[in-house]
Image (tube, rainbow, N blue to C red):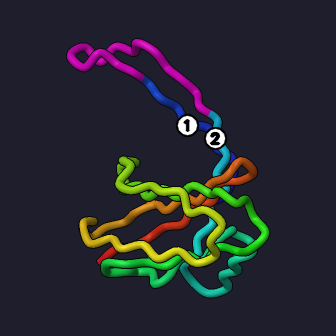
Amino acid sequence: MVGNYIILFTITDAPNQDCIQTYLLPISVEMRSGIGPGYDAQNTGFFLYPNPAVDRIYLQIPEGGNSSPHLSIRDIAGRLVQELFVGPRTLVELHLPDLIAGLYLVTLADEDSTVTERLLLK
């Protein structure tokens, strides 16, 4: 959910369960999804379809942005599974035959902004 949060991490000694160190991490979540009614591509920076997908997706990128955006796809554990520079294109087609079914995060970033969309592969 969009908003500001504080995450509390506590590192313990497993056998004794003694507290070794506690950290507070403030984060700001600004992710928006292109899934569902009322989606507006201009608010999120790109349009991802079809979603859910089987083995290929398309990204519609608005004109007028940075000429060298970077695209990355991460699995739900945060591991990078694919990345590329998309250049000044407004439509990108990605073939994803090697990815297993599951939830992925597709991020488009340039020096001005970073936008992440959820992708469900069947």
Residue 51 visible here: yes
**Quadrant location, the C terminus:** bottom left
Q: In this view, does 62 lie above or below 110?
A: below
Q: What residue is shown with label 2? A: 27
In depth, the one of 96 and 104 nearer the eye is 96
Which x, y percent locates residue 113? 71, 53
Residue picked out by circle 1? 7
- Amino acid type, label 2: Ile
For the point 39% across and 21% down, the residue is 11
Looking at the image, the residue that sits furthest to the right is: 64
- Give the image location of residue 79, x and y in percent: 36, 47
Q: Quadrant of the N terminus?
A: bottom right
Q: Give the range drawn in magenta.
A: 11-25
| Image: 89 above or below 39 | above
Query: Looking at the magenta stretch, what is its main secondary structure?
Result: strand
- Nearest the camera: 103 or 45? 45
Residue occupying image coordinates x 65% and y 56%: 68
Q: Mark 2 or mark 1, which has the lower sequence index?
A: 1
What amino acid does circle 1 point to?
Ile
